[in-house]
Image: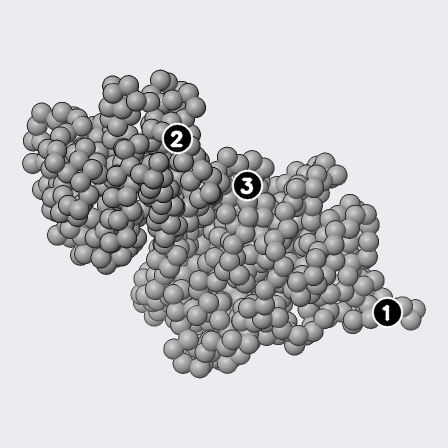
């Protein structure tokens, strides 16, 4: 196999230079090195992926906690070698159906069985050659801290809304478990690097076990095509923010190109956390949701996973399935079967389901002897005191119900707590009238999907059950509203599992619904489940991942930050940092200069308490204005009264107020309007609407201006304020649809202003005035920090194409911070802006001294 890889993650961690290798090779055993790597250790710098790959075939690397393999030892004839086979029940294997036959798939993950260190290298080579699987061998102690420790004690409970309020509820945060989690994620990163061709391959990471893996891969390969799907719920920000490593996990996920969730609720909670904790907001454009993160767009995918239709249908057709269905038909003859299939854990709500069934038998004596609840309890995936408590409560409740309502030949609850073959479980689906899912919190849960397909049955199963194949099939579902599959099953009876009376009532309704209603609901569900299977889900995710990565090639990327704070800056190739030496040199050799400076966020930090111009800023502006070669304007969204007071010391400074509506060429001139606005009667329409939202949004207020009305929600709750801003925007656009105004949203504001008013007017007016004086600028500097300044950049850029500038003009459009912009240059912050302007002012001062001497 052609590969390009790092030979050893620990070499990287120690700062050694990465070595690339090509050609087939045995996998290294770096993953067998015991110990915990701290997330604070710094790795070597990022490695660009600009060497052309020789792999032409599309390839996807699927990374999950466990490989889709089964393993057992051959113990016959004295041969105890390992024997491996595909695990047909693994989602990672099933999703291959959606990737196309021409796509090569490589799996990276752990094996369920522990492999002796002496066998690991041979096993790894066998798995790579036979199954295209790359095993990550994790030392047992480290794996226990990683999986049973951090994953199951911290992430899993928290993501299912369980707070560690006491040591018994998930346990207090343990830093050593977090370090084990980071260390295992680094081992996975090393394994991916052994096989990846970073320019060509797509990497798809699965679930909460590997949440920091995107950071390690992005750090090695800035342009890696990286997708991540979370198969568990994502909690609300109020829950998630209690996690001590909340920022690290969010930043790690944002190093992906596409992040997938089962439901909008999970995605909404993630977006809210990004907004509240990182200040990163999302935008929806043409149906796609994206987060702008350091020049990269991180896309959000919302699509529930489906089932493997082909596998399910093949098991339905087995002879063993038919025999088991016949057996169950005879066993439950004359009775209606309700079915529950759940893991034995605290979130599946088994005891709540049993209590609701008990209530049903209490309230409806006629159901006794006729209705049976079959509860299949799969072994718990976790371990601990909570699992034992669930088991004890379940057994006690089943015993009480059976003793209270049972009679000879009738057992109300049949509890199956032994492992079943897949065909046996399917047989229970086939003979059950209703499936009950009462989990109090669950990421997805595919049990209802499997049940629906099994109720569709086959001709042979219809014959076994004595059904007429021409009669439409029927099924009923009672589903918790806290389960990920609930939104996609519109025909299910949705319940709050905590409301025992409601669940009991839903059970009764499911039994007494007319046959035609049951058939209609089943048909609706079957059409959805059969068309939205696992192949559809995988194909859709990969399509969106390709779309999210399509701009990688043309972007310039470089990494910033240390440890888990690492992120990648992605910018246009023409976008670069403004060199002070370059601009000062151009400034010195030019004779007619135009300087446009935004104020808020450019001359001063936007979040600063004191936003008055500093003494340093005033001095710089005065020195620039004293130069007769310069025309300098400060452009702001503030009212003219504030700007008049602020810039009293600057006699020759031009000032524009209210984002271009008002302008004053110098201190002694009168304020003029850039656009003639005959009437502001629309304020009488807009202000009452804004007032309504101000009263209902704590922390918001209205800023009345001469030309505009601004609703500011900077001090409001971020999520509620943003939600209200969207509503207000729609409301204002509706009531002002026929008025000559524009309604726009900005950073924590919604603004209504006359059409055509923007900062570009100031730039256009300045250049026009200079042209009328027969002075064509040969130097233009324009600096701004937000979207309102983009109009200025656009005007001065387009001026290069007409006669507004000198043919040899040097134009510097500069934004503050590294972000997508129409500007060609950037400086990092306000301090750098002031240092650059000081350099220009010093040049003017030196020029004046030279003239006076000569």
> Going by the image, does 397 lie left or right of 714?
right
Residue 234 on image: x %, y %: 43, 59
Tell me the tag on residue 442: none
Lower sequence index among marks 2 and 3? 3
**Residue plotted at (11% across, 44% down):** 641
Contact between marks 3 and 1 (CB within 8 A): the answer is: no
**Residue plotted at (71% across, 40% down):** 53
Lower sequence index among marks 1 and 2? 1
Give the alpha-carbon distance from disc 3 to disc 1, as whole Å: 53 Å
Lower sequence index among marks 3 and 1? 1
Residue 369 on image: x %, y %: 44, 67
Tell me the tag on residue 556: 3
Local secondary structure at mark 1: loop
Residue 614 on image: x %, y %: 25, 54
Toward the viewer: 590 or 644? 590
Number of other residues with Cα within 10 Å of mark 3, as a class: few under 14, some 14 to 19, many 20 or more = some
Name the residue that disc number 2 marks: 590
Name the residue that disc number 1 marks: 80
């Amino acid at each position: 196999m052609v590969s390009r890889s790092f030979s050893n993650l620990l070499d990287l961690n120690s700062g050694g230079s990465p070595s690339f290798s090509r050609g087939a090779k045995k996998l290294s055993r770096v993953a067998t090195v015991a110990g915990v790597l701290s997330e604070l250790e710094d790795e070597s710098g990022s490695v660009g992926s600009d060497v052309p790959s020789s792999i032409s075939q599309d390839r996807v690397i699927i990374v999950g906690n466990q490989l889709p393999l089964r393993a057992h030892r051959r113990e016959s004839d004295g041969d105890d070698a390992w024997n491996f086979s595909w695990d047909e029940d693994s989602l990672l294997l099933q999703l291959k159906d959606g990737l196309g036959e021409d796509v090569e798939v490589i799996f990276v993950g752990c094996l369920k069985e522990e492999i002796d260190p002496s066998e690991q290298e041979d096993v790894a080579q066998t798995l790579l050659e036979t199954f295209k699987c790359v095993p990550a061998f994790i030392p047992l102690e480290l794996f226990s801290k990683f999986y049973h420790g951090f994953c199951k004690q911290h992430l899993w409970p928290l993501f299912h809304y369980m707070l560690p309020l006491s040591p018994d509820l998930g346990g207090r945060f343990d830093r050593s478990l977090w370090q084990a989690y980071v260390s295992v994620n680094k081992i996975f990163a090393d394994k991916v690097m052994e096989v990846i061709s970073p320019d060509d391959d797509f990497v798809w990471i699965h679930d909460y076990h590997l949440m920091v893996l995107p950071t390690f891969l992005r750090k090695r390969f800035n342009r890696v095509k990286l997708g991540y799907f979370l198969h568990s719920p994502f909690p609300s920000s109020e829950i998630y923010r209690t996690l001590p490593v909340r920022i690290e996990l969010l930043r790690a996920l944002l190093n992906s190109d596409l992040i997938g969730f089962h439901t909008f609720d999970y995605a909404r909670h993630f977006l809210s956390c990004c907004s509240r904790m990182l200040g990163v907001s999302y935008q929806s454009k043409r149906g796609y949701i994206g987060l702008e993160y350091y020049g990269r767009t991180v896309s959000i995918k919302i699509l529930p996973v489906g089932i493997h239709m082909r596998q399910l249908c093949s098991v339905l057709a087995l002879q063993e399935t038919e025999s088991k269905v016949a057996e169950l038909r005879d066993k439950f003859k004359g009775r209606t079967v309700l079915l529950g299939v759940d893991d034995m854990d605290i979130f599946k709500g088994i005891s709540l389901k049993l209590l609701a069934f008990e209530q049903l038998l209490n309230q409806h004596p006629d159901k006794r002897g006729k209705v049976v609840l079959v509860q299949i309890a799969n072994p718990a995936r976790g371990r601990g005191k909570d699992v034992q408590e669930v088991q004890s409560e379940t057994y006690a409740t089943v015993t009480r119900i059976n003793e209270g309502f049972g009679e000879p030949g009738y057992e109300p609850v049949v509890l199956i707590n032994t492992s079943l073959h897949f065909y046996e479980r399917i047989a229970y689906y086939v003979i059950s009238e209703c499936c009950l899912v009462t989990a109090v919190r669950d990421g997805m849960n595919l049990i209802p999907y499997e049940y629906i397909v099994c109720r569709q049955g086959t001709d042979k199963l219809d014959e076994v059950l004595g059904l007429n194949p021409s009669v439409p099939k029927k099924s009923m579902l009672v589903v918790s509203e806290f389960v990920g599959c609930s939104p996609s099953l519109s025909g299910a009876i949705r319940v709050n599992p905590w409301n025992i009376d409601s669940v009991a009532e839903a059970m009764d309704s499911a039994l007494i619904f007319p046959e035609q209603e049951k058939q209609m609901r089943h048909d609706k569900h079957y059409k959805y489940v059969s068309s939205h299977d696992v192949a559809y889900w995988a194909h859709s995710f990969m399509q969106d991942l390709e779309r999210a990565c399509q701009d990688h090639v043309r972007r310039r990327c470089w990494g910033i930050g240390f440890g888990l704070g690492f992120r990648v800056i992605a910018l246009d190739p023409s976008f670069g940092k403004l060199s002070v030496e370059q601009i000062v040199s151009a400034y010195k050799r030019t004779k007619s200069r135009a300087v446009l400076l935004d104020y808020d966020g450019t001359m001063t930090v936007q979040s600063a308490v004191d936003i008055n111009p500093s003494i340093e800023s005033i001095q710089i502006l005065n020195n620039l204005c004293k130069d007769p070669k310069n025309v300098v304007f400060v452009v702001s969204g503030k009212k003219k009264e504030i700007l008049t007071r602020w810039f009293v010391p600057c006699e020759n400074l031009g000032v524009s107020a209210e984002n271009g509506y008002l302008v004053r060429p110098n201190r002694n001139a009168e304020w003029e309007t850039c656009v003639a606005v005959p009437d502001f009667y629309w304020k009488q329409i807009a202000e009452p609407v804004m007032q309504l939202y101000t009263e209902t949004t704590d922390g918001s207020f209205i800023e009345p201006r001469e030309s505009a009305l601004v609703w500011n929600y900077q001090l409001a709750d971020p999520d509620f304020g943003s939600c209200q801003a969207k509503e207000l925007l729609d409301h204002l656009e509706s009531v002002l649809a026929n008025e000559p105004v524009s309604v726009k949203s900005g950073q924590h504001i919604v603004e209504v202003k006359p059409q055509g008013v923007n900062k570009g007017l100031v730039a256009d007016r300045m250049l026009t005035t200079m042209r009328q004086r027969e002075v064509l600028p040969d130097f233009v500097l324009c600096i701004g920090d937000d979207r309102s300044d983009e109009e200025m950049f656009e005007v001065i850029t387009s001026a290069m194409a007409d006669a507004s500038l000198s043919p040899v003009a040097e134009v510097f459009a500069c934004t503050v911070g590294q972000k997508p912009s129409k500007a060609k240059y950037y400086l990092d912050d306000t301090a750098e802006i002031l240092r650059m302007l000081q350099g220009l002012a010093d040049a003017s001062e030196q020029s004046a001294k030279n003239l006076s001497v000569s």
